[in-house]
Every structure is written in structure tokens, then in C-alpha cells.
């Protein structure tokens, strides 16, 4: 994996903890420009990066990384939980938003989950994101086109996917069975002509219009 953080002590602590769990950090960067260059050079399974680095913008790096190689799984490691910033990061291609309060001990599990194709957002923050979506506080989520191949229920599922919710969390929020949610996700992917959950989330902004139905 590639690690981007402007604090050298934080980088060392994270690197040492990951290497104890046999997770190889192939490169480290102190700013967005270097993070992007190293990520595109090494093409790691996982990119773990801070949203507060100098030398660029988080969303630009996420978009360019995922456009260059959709197999790279970016995870944002933040010092605070901002629903709007997190939602924008997920829409730009991140597969996770984790608070640094998780501590270094929890990072190997996060990195492995991301590498295995899972969304990595803490259970507590998932609830915050879902509440923000339902309140319409997160731009770009919850807005829907006047005409769409997706049903109303499928849009509800897609909204929660965009907020980083897992299938089980979506099932709990919408009072559906996990199998029903999985069926909706497969149908959404088929209708959007994509093959992965992340691609469906990335495609969602292009389908939305300013007005909500």
C-alpha cells in the first residue's frame, strides 16, 4: 500500500504497525502531489491518505487515482468526522473514511477490508452519514433525476451505498432483508451497466439532477 500523511511521526507509527501485520508499505508521501505520483507509479491495492495534506486537493487526487486504476482502493484517514467532506470523498472514489481515533491497532483490519473490496466506514459515522443524507445536508446525495430506470427503492439503496453503508446497514435502515438488499444492488449495477459497487457509486452523480422528486 501507499501511505500519505504530512506528519512524519504519524507515517512511521502507521508503517511500523502495518508491517507488524505483514502489510507492506511500498511508499510514503508528505503531500498530495507526491501521494498521487507514487500511487500511480506503484498501483497499490490500498491507498491510505490524510485529507489535510498540502500540495493539492483530496477530491482531485481521489478522482485521478480511481480514473487511472479502479482497482486501487483509497481510504481517507481523518482527524475529524465531517459528513459532507466524507460523502464527497466517497463520491470521488474513496472506499472508506476512518477517524484517526481508531488508533494504529485497528488499521491492519481496515487495510485488509479495503483490499478485499469492503467499504470501510465506522458504524458510528455511518449513522451520521445516513442522518445527513436523510436530512438533505450532503450535496449530491439524495437528488434524483426526473426520469430514471431505477425505482424509488433502488434510489434509496443507492443513496445509502453512496453514503458508505454496507448491505447489512442498508437492510437495517430500510427494514429489508440482506438478501433483498443484495438483489437491489445487483439490479442497480445491471441498470447502470457497471460490474462493481464502487462503479455504481461513481456513476450516481452523473444521473442526478438539482431537484429531488
Image: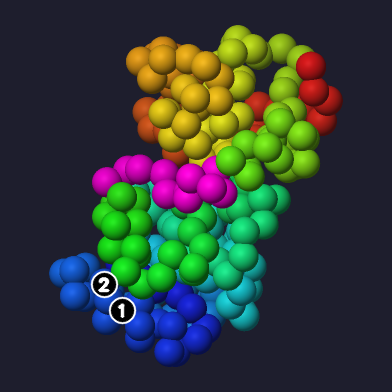
Q: Position of residue 39 (x, y in %)?
A: 39, 68
Q: Which residue is mark 1?
A: 15
Highlighted range, magenta: 116-126
Q: Which quarter of the figure has residue 21?
A: bottom left
70 is higher (above) or lower (below) than 144:
below
Q: Is residue 175 above or below residue 126?
A: above
Residue 180 as seen in the image, left or right of residue 56: left
Q: Residue at x 71, y 40 (%)?
A: 132
Decide whether residue 125 is among the magenta residues. Answer: yes
Q: Which of the labelled discs sits on residue 18, or is there none? A: 2
Name the spot of residue 92 as percent of width and height, x first: 57, 49
User: Dot 2 lies on which element?
Assistant: helix
Q: Quadrant of the N terminus?
A: bottom left
x and y, in percent, of residue 131 in the image: 68, 37
**Is residue 205 among the parts visible in the rendering?**
yes
Is the residue 139 above or below the residue 16 in the image? above
Disc 1 to disc 2, how far (Cα)? 5 Å
In the shown orientation, is residue 166 left or right of residue 1? right
Q: Residues within 10 Å of mark 1 (few under 14, many from 20)?
A: many
Q: In the image, is 123 to the left or to the right of 211?
A: left
Residue at left 38%, top 53%? 73
Instruction: Report which quarter residue 202 is drawn in.
Output: top right
Answer yes or no: do the residues labelled 1 and 2 have beta carbons within 8 Å? yes
| Residue at (37, 28) in percent of width and height | 195
* Viewer-side residue, 194 vs 187: 187
**Towards the viewer: 207 or 175:** 175
Q: Quick one: quadrant of the C terminus?
A: top right
Residue depicted at x 74% and y 28%? 143
Amino acid at each position: 500500500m501507499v501511505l500519505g500523511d504530512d506528519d512524519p511521526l504519524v507515517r512511521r507509527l502507521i508503517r511500523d504497525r502495518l508491517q507488524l501485520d505483514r502489510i507492506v508499505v511500498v511508499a510514503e508521501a508528505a503531500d498530495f502531489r507526491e501521494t498521487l505520483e507514487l500511487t500511480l507509479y506503484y498501483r497499490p491495492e490500498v491507498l491510505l491518505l490524510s485529507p489535510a495534506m498540502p500540495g493539492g486537493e483530496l477530491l482531485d487526487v481521489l478522482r485521478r487515482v480511481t480514473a487511472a486504476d479502479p482497482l486501487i482502493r483509497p481510504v481517507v484517514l481523518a482527524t475529524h468526522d465531517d459528513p459532507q467532506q466524507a460523502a464527497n470523498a466517497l463520491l470521488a472514489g474513496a472506499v472508506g473514511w476512518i477517524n484517526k481515533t481508531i488508533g494504529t491497532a485497528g488499521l491492519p483490519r481496515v487495510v485488509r477490508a479495503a483490499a478485499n473490496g469492503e467499504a470501510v466506514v465506522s458504524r458510528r459515522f455511518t449513522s451520521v452519514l445516513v442522518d445527513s443524507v436523510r436530512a438533505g445536508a450532503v450535496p449530491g446525495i439524495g437528488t434524483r433525476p426526473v426520469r430514471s430506470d431505477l425505482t424509488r427503492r433502488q434510489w434509496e439503496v443507492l443513496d445509502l451505498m453512496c453514503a458508505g453503508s454496507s448491505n447489512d446497514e442498508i437492510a437495517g435502515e430500510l427494514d429489508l432483508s440482506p438478501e433483498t438488499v443484495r438483489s437491489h444492488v445487483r439490479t442497480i449495477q445491471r441498470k447502470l451497466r457497471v460490474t462493481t459497487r464502487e462503479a455504481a457509486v461513481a456513476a450516481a452523480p452523473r444521473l442526478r439532477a438539482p431537484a429531488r422528486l
